[in-house]
Amino acid sequence: MPDLNSPAGRTTSLTGARALVAALRLHGVDTVFGIPGTHNLAIYQELDLAGIRCVTPRHEQGAGYAADGYARVTGRPGVIVTTTGPAAVNAAAALGQAYSDSSPLLLISPGVPTDHPRQGRGYLHESKDQSGAIDALCAWSHRVSSVREIPAGVARAFGQFAEGRPRPVHVEIPADLLDREGEARLAPPYRLMPRTPDPEALDEAARLLRTARRPGLVLGGGAQRPGAREQPVGRLAMRIAECVGARVVTTVNGKGVVPESHPLALGATLHLEGVRRWLASCDVVLAVGTELGPADLWEDDYVLPGTLIRVDVDPGQMYGDHVADVAVVSDAGLAMEGLHGRIEQAGAVPRPRQEPWRGHIPEMDELTARWAGHIAALRRALPQDTILVGDNSMMVYHGALVALPMDPPGRFLFPTGYGTLGFALPAGIGAKIGMPDRPVVVLAGDGALQFSVQELATAVELRLSLPIVVSANGGFGEIRDEMKNRGMTPVAVDLHAPDFVALAVAYGARGRAVGSPDDLHEALTEALGAPVPTVIVITE
Ligand SMILES: Cc1ncc(C[n+]2csc(CCOP(=O)(O)OP(=O)(O)O)c2C)c(N)n1
Ligand SMILES: [Mg+2]
């Protein structure tokens, strides 16, 4: 095979599949998540020749979430390779999730051949408009029309990840192009300098924060630095908070950016009414890298009466639901550095500290009481640098999200905006592949786990040390409660579940049922040291 390390930018005659894989390698891709099929054999052949690691989850949905978990913890784009039609669409929910959570995913799929009329001719895996269907869910989806366009498509994808919010994209390659020779120019990756803040906007923001009576900070996923032991934005945010006497709350995707054990930190609790009330009472709010979206606020029409300073790399955020009074369109780190410098230079502001938060938010105890014992056991058992990967289950958003304070470098991966189920196990697998030296723990309900339980096979095959904590409550507990709350008789929510311990063992994993928090603590400690995944079932 030709030397794929040859200088970028040279025009060479390559097959489409080879051009694709050469472009991926040029952009530093060494791992892909996907499933082979009739139409992508040429891609797999080239991936293998190029020494790129091919991880095979058992469903393309799992490949998508695994790529997402990998991307969130490493900051490197997660690459998914599927075959045509149903395979590509199976991965689409993961793109939707990554779109709402700003995760850089590249889905590569073959499509019907270039000369195919796409009018229902019975071609294998045929769709009327595969890239059109996926386009509706991600930043963009593009069907290339020549070999030459393949490396350009990959380069464009990586460009998209580096500018603004990193959001998922799809490149469809007509199946016939994969084996066809064509002239291709391997586009070198380009480096973008971080967007710098407007100094005047920073002056104004610093003045507002220093003179505020009751300042508040909100940090979102845009404040995270993947893989970082040090979270510079979080550190600067806490220094600013201490200077001006502000409390700091994070969104779900921002959890772990600041030390949640700090007296000024409120954790990831925007969904609690007491916290929303406090934020609405702030006269100045600094929001960094967040949509301030309803999926975090659990309220559609939330109003922030105070003066709003927004820091975001995406100019579109300035005019979202909450319009910025002071707009700082910038890299979060540079903006916070500038802001901190200005505030510190002016000296600390003498003012009474805002009250400590714990015990002042009544509904926190109510909603988390059920999980408090088990979450405390998790907290005791888990090292500080644990990556928790949660699913859309009550134990996660009523339990760990609120009651398990995280200090950096802890990370919390959760499918927030799009709110999918089946995320945690495959995303946990991807996170463990991306960060093999960090403890990764999966938390899922019995409902959520069954959306992707077959990925246990993937985790066993890869011999991942991965505790998977399952809360078993006989089905869709949240939906059961919502039905009761609207006065209806619960329907379609009480579900048969397998014996998860036996299922784990059948897959080649370890399995254990626990009752008390002490049992959970012991099981987790053991599982963290085990060379294979362990399913730990909490029975209620
Ligand atoms: C893909 C998808 N399908 C359906 C839903 C709707 N939904 C939200 S929570 C939930 C129940 C989840 O059950 P489980 O994981 O067992 O958690 P529990 O509520 O029992 O704690 C369902 C069905 C969803 N969020 N995503
Ligand atoms: Mg359940």
Image: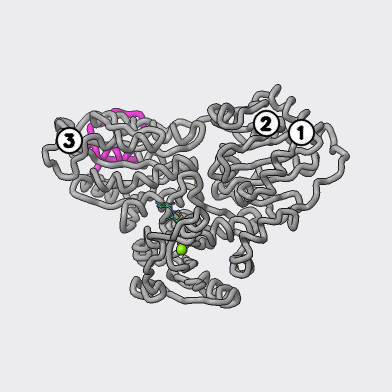
Kindly give the residue lying farthest to the top in the view shown: 200
Q: Residues within 10 Å of mark 2 (few under 14, many from 20)?
A: many
Q: Residues within 10 Å of mark 1 (few under 14, many from 20)?
A: many
Q: Is residue 10 magenta?
A: yes
Q: Do the residues labelled 3 and 2 touch (CB within 8 Å)?
A: no
Kindly give the residue lying farthest to the right in the view shown: 350
Q: Where is residue 419 in the image (x, y as percent from the top left)?
A: 46, 48
Identify the residue position indicated by label 2 in the image. Answer: 309
Q: Disc 1 marks which amino acid?
A: Leu
- At a point 74% along the width and 58% down the height, the residue shown is 359
Task: Of the two numbered discs 1 and 3 on the same chain, state the one appearing first in sequence.
Answer: 3
Identify the residue position indicated by label 3 in the image. Answer: 113
- At a point 86% along the width and 44% down the height, the residue shown is 352
Q: Could you give the CA–CA distance between mark 1 and mark 2, rounded to whole angstroms?
A: 9 Å
Helix, strand or loop at mark 2: strand
In the rendered image, which quarter contains the N terminus? Answer: top left
Q: Are marks 1 and 2 in contact (CB under 8 Å)?
A: yes
Q: Is residue 469 magenta?
A: no
Q: How crowded is mark 3: few (under 14 residues within 10 Å), some or many (20 or more)?
A: some
Q: Disc 2 marks which amino acid?
A: Ile
Q: Where is residue 130 in the image (x, y as percent from the top left)?
A: 26, 37
Q: Where is residue 282 in the image (x, y as percent from the top left)?
A: 74, 38
Q: Give the range drawn in magenta.
A: 1-22
